[in-house]
Image: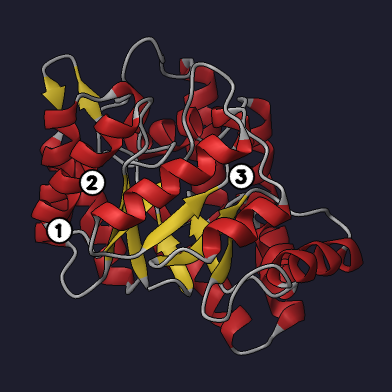
Amino acid sequence: MFTGLSAFPLTPVTPAGLDERGFIRLLERIASAGADSIGVLGSTGSYAYLTRPQRKQIATIAKSHAGNIPLIVCVGSLSTDEVLRLADDAQAAGANALLLPPVSYQKLRDDEVFGLFETLTQHVSVPVCIYDNPGTTHFEFSDELHGRIAELAGIRSVKIPGVPPSPEDALARVQRLKSKLPAGVTVGISGDASAATGLNAGCEVWYSVCGGLFPQTAKEITDAAARGERERVVQLSERLQPLWDLFRKHGGSIRVMAAAAGALRLTDVDCLPRPLRPLSADDIAEVAAVITRLELR
């Protein structure tokens, strides 16, 4: 479950609420591509904008359409009590693992983040992945804190942001983190543009936004990495540079993925929770052109 391709789809919404049909279409693409796991309600899955009942509904739908693919559900929230309630809902829906980012309004200290993970792992019966995403949580993990948390029973993976662009620096970064982790805890890369570098540096899993909409394209990369085809991994990722450029141009992946899902008629063109808004018509046309040119699937 914590190796290979972990595909993270959008959570499409409409003014009337969750777009269940659109979400199911995304799940069906992932399942048919044979992803190694499905991660719902991540950052591109808009967990922070959804109510508890909506998050439970998404987890339930995902489980019913994941087939034999393991399901990872994000349970991030501001308060520990709410994290535990969300974890109960996710487990009741059939989640195979949980993903936890240290979300906060007040800046958290290391001991508070450790306590959050300690409380969750003592409360649940499924594995937990540490979600290190300072761009949204504004919390910076040290490798030492990762190592301390990873000693807790139930921690099975660390989801890190992008690695340095230099292969040598990326290798050093991943090795430094792994030296702090107990055996059996994997390291996963989540910055799509640096996924190839991270995989070649020893990351065992790609927690992939791209894989949430274009799972076959993403799986080609993780399959090549599993075979040790390092040059092929780089070539496949470099071919996707226009997509990575769109992510940078629009301040991240969520608006681009929403535009892409709409362009493919999998969801409405406007499928983001407010206050987020869709890209302009010209930008959506650019996204559609990239999908066609790169034959993303």
Q: Residues within 10 Å of mark 3 (few under 14, many from 20)?
A: many
Q: CA distance from mark 3 to mark 2?
A: 33 Å
Where is residue 90 shown, x and y percent of the image?
18, 49
Q: Amino acid at mark 3?
A: Leu
Contact (CB < 8 A) between labels 2 and 1? Answer: no
Tell me where residue 56 sits by quadrant: top left
Q: CA distance from mark 2 to mark 1?
A: 15 Å
Task: Tell me which residue sits at (41%, 18%) in the image.
Answer: 278
Q: Nearer the viewer, residue 260 or 219?
A: 219
Q: CA distance from mark 1 to mark 3?
A: 29 Å
Helix, strand or loop status at disc 2: helix
Q: Is residue 52 above or below residue 172?
A: above
* Residue pointed to by mark 3: 243
Q: Amino acid at mark 1?
A: Lys
Where does the C terminus fall, quadrant-wise? bottom left
Q: Is residue 147 left or right of residue 59?
A: right
